[in-house]
Image (tube, rainbow, N blue to C red):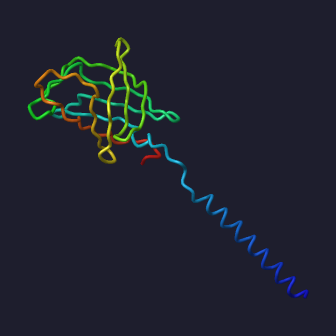
Amino acid sequence: MKRFGRLLLFAMMTMTTLAAQTAGKSAETKPAKENPLEAYAGTWTATLDGNAWMTVRLVLQGQQLTGSVQRPQSLKINDDGEVKSVSEERLNEAVENSQINGDGLLLTAKGADAKDSDRFLLRLTGDNTAEMKMLAMSMPPGMVKPKPWKLTRTAGTVAPAAR
């Protein structure tokens, strides 16, 4: 009977040790919960004939993206919906709100002197590529609908966790 008791005690100690080790490993291997906004952080640029015409800077601060959108005051679209030319005058808008939706990242930005906010949709197409379009853009009758603008993330501006 003593032998059975010792064997039972040994078996219980072994099971307790194994359970503790397994619990410790599962806690260690759980990945940290990633913020989906991290994938959008960085400096994004749209170019026309090799020149930057729009720059979007997004910085993750807590659970929110902040930053700015620098874009031309006006732009012209060709018959294919591509940007043909942009004005020299630039608008600088601060990002007021950012929110993930089913299509990508919805950005709301507003210039210091502007009465209304502008809304954009930024959709990732690769690790360092994206498309962006302005939402609720008023178009004159018969004008071609603009295609989304192609942006590239500047090297070295990716959020550390997103690398």
**Closer to us: 114 or 87:** 114
Relative to 37, 151 lies left or right: left
Which residue lies most toward the right here? 2
Q: Residue at x 87, y 88 (%)?
A: 3
Relative to 5, 132 lies left or right: left
Q: Residue at x 66, y 67 (%)?
A: 22
Q: Based on the displayed image, in which of its 4 quarters is residue 117 positioned?
A: top left
**Closer to us: 60 or 146:** 146
- Up-down: is 16 above or below 52? below
Count numbered badges in the picture.
0
Q: Residue at x 16, y 31 (%)?
A: 145
- Up-down: is 120 above or below 93? below
Q: Based on the displayed image, in which of its 4 quarters is residue 90 positioned?
A: top left
**Which quadrant of the figure contains the N terminus?**
bottom right
In the rendered image, residue 58, in percent from the top left (x then y), is placed at 40, 33
In the rendered image, residue 36, in percent from the top left (x then y), is placed at 45, 43
Which residue lies most toward the front here? 141
In the rendered image, residue 73, in percent from the top left (x then y), is placed at 24, 18
In the rendered image, residue 21, in percent from the top left (x then y), is placed at 68, 67
Q: Based on the displayed image, in which of its 4 quarters is residue 133 positioned?
A: top left
